[in-house]
Structures are given as structure tokens and as C-alpha cells.
Amino acid sequence: MRKRLSTILLLAGSAALLWSATVWVSAALFEKYEAWRWNSRSAEANRAPVAPAPGAVTGSAPARREPKSHDVIAWLEVPRLRISTAVLEGDDDLALRLGAGHIPGTPLPGDAGNVGIAAHRDSFFRSLAGVEPKDRIRLHTPGRDWEYTVESTEIVRPTDVGVLANSRQPELTLVTCYPFWYVGPAPLRFIVRARRTG
């Protein structure tokens, strides 16, 4: 009986390890591929002059396509903490497994207002535990790069969605679970508030 139990536990542990490795490898490969695509698109955009679309009125702002779920819409970097990750549209399980997720209902990166971005504390936002006021956050979008400066952090309950309330100032709110060391679904949320400075 004891031998059978140890075999079952060994198989279960091996399966869990294999699943974890698969998730980690798929996320790492996705990040590498998207970083390559992002850099290629940025280099191409810098080389080629933008021609107006046929029938477009000269001097008018180009029409922006609304992103679909799981589109990579930006690239987020916190240089001091060595955070660098794709930002996908949406905050469901798939988006947060592959990178950071743009929280629906908040402005898109680069728009005016309070942009909300979430990621898991045990993957892409692991280093966020060491964030400090005045840390720089860079948000690269297809049209432009934006810089934010961290102003404050706070810990809230998951139901305290007021941290995502829109504002007249261009802001960025990063959200992850808290405590960082917690095993399983964490009971609180760690919030980083930053203001756009460039």
C-alpha cells in the first residue's frame, strides 16, 4: 500500500512539474517571439514614411483599430527592476499567463486617463515587490513611447476597484496580487500608481 501511494505521489508530482515547465516555456517563447516582432515593427516604422490611406483627409488623425482580445498592444518596462513584458489586451487567464494584461474599461496605453495593467505576482510582476517612488516605467506603444514616474503604492482588497477610477491626468496603475510570498490565490492586491512625465 505504501509503495503504491509513493508511486501515485511521484506520478502526481511529475505531472505537476511537467505542467509548470510547459506553462513557463510557452510564456518564455511567447515573450521572445513578441519582443522580436515588436522590435521589427518599431524598426520598420522608423524607416518608412507613413503614407496617408486612400481617401483619407490630409491633416486628420489616423483611424485607430480597436484591439482584439489577446492582441499585444504595448510593451512595459521598469528598468531598475528589470521588468520587461508584453502587454496584451484583456486580463483573463490566457493574457496573464503570456504577459501583462490591459484591464478592460480603462483607457488604452498612451490615451489620457488612468491606464490599468495587471500581471501575476509570481511571474511578470515578481520584481514589483521592490518598487520605489520615483522609479521610471516605460510604456512603448506602436505610435509612441511614454514614460511614467512612480508616485505611490498601496495594498487594497480585490473589491476596491476605485484604484482604477479614471482621472483627468495621464496615469498608469499596475495591479498584482499580494502578499508576494503567498501560496495560492492571494487575498489582497498590490497597487502601483504612476504619473506620466514624458
Image: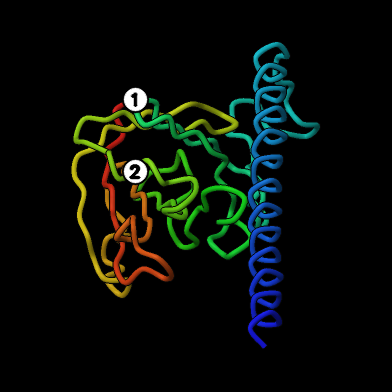
Q: Amino acid at mark 2?
A: Leu
Label 1's element? Answer: loop
Q: Measured from the top left, where is residue 116 in percent x and y?
A: 40, 53
Decide which of 194, 119 is in the foreground and name it.
119
* Residue indicated by mark 2: 128
Question: Within 10 Å of the Cα at label 2, are there few (<14), some (14-19), or many (20+) other Cα atoms?
Answer: many
Residue at 59%, 53% (x, y): give it.
Answer: 89
Tell which circle, 1 or 2, labels the residue nearer the N-terminal end. 2
Mark identifier at residue 148: none
- 80 left or right, relative to 152: right
Residue at 47%, 42% (x, y): give it.
Answer: 109
Q: Quadrant of the C terminus?
A: top left
Q: Quadrant of residue 165?
A: bottom left
Q: Measured from the top left, where is residue 126 in percent x and y?
A: 41, 46
Mark identifier at residue 198: 1
Q: Residue furthest right?
A: 54
The span from disc 1 to disc 2 (Cα, nearest Å) is 21 Å
Residue at 36%, 31% (x, y): give it.
Answer: 81
Decide which of 7, 95 is in the foreground and name it.
7
Q: Quadrant of residue 136?
A: top left
Q: Amino acid at mark 1?
A: Gly
From what the image shows, is residue 177 above or below residue 147? below
Label 2's element? Answer: helix
Question: Within 10 Å of the Cα at label 1, are there few (<14), some (14-19), or many (20+) other Cα atoms?
Answer: few
Q: Measured from the top left, where is residue 176 in percent x and y?
A: 38, 56
Q: Are marks 1 and 2 in contact (CB under 8 Å)?
A: no
Decide which of 145, 56 is in the foreground and name it.
145
- 99 left or right, relative to 70: left
Residue at 44%, 43% (x, y): give it.
Answer: 111
